Image (cartoon, grey):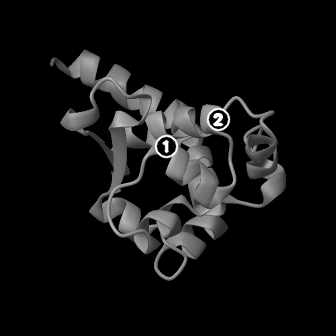
Amino acid sequence: MDEKARANVEIWKYALGFAAMRVVKCAIELGLPDAMENHDGPMTLSQLSAAVGCPTGSLHRIMRFLTHNGIFKKELNLSKSQDPESFYYSQTALSRLLTRDKMGPFVLVQAGPPSQSAGLTVKDLKSGKGSGV
């Protein structure tokens, strides 16, 4: 990639960096890293949904973003490949740092007060109103 292309990638990272922080903040507030830490092994979307009290539709969109950004891993259970619950989510070293007993509270403080959520809030996600990214 040439210098101009790299510069374009970087500027978009700076311009949209707040979006990633909002989603990570929501993940911590929902308790996703903690739910996965306390569960013994990978979890399906419905298991995560039940654990954090968030509808699967909203949660699916957040998990898509979080897996794309390497915060969680998405794995296919080949024995259930035709089943909608054939995908499992598991932790990464990064998600383990986001638990409430590690860096999670610090990240929440750095993300700013709830009034700065700019439309993405845990309350809306849990009620099914949030677009979930």
Report the quarter where the C terminus lies.
top right
Res. 126 in view:
yes
- Height in image: 55 above or below 26? above
In the image, residue 128 lies at what x, y percent? 77, 36
Count of numbered labels shown in the rendering: 2
Residue 73's place in the image compared with 129, above or below, is below
Specify the amino acid type for callout 1. Answer: Leu
Residue ID at (37%, 48%)? 89
What residue occupies the far left of the structure in this picture?
Answer: 1
Distance from disc 2 to disc 1, alpha carbons, whole Å, reads 11 Å
Circle 2 sits on which residue? Answer: 58
Q: Considering depth in this image, is 103 or 74 the residue closer to the camera?
A: 74
**Quarter of the image where the N terminus is located:** top left
Local secondary structure at mark 1: helix
Three-letter amino acid code of the residue under disc 2: Ser
Mark nearer the N terminus (2 vs 1): 1
Q: Give the quadrant of residue 16.
A: top right
Residue at the spot 59% in from the left edge and 60% down from the top edge: 51
Residue 69 can be seen, yes or no: no
Q: Nearer the viewer, residue 84 or 6?
A: 84
Report the disc number at residue 103.
Answer: none
Compared to residue 37, the image places residue 14 above or below, namely above
Secondary structure beneath disc 2?
helix
**Which residue is nearer to you in this view: 127 or 77?**
77
The residue under label 1 is 45
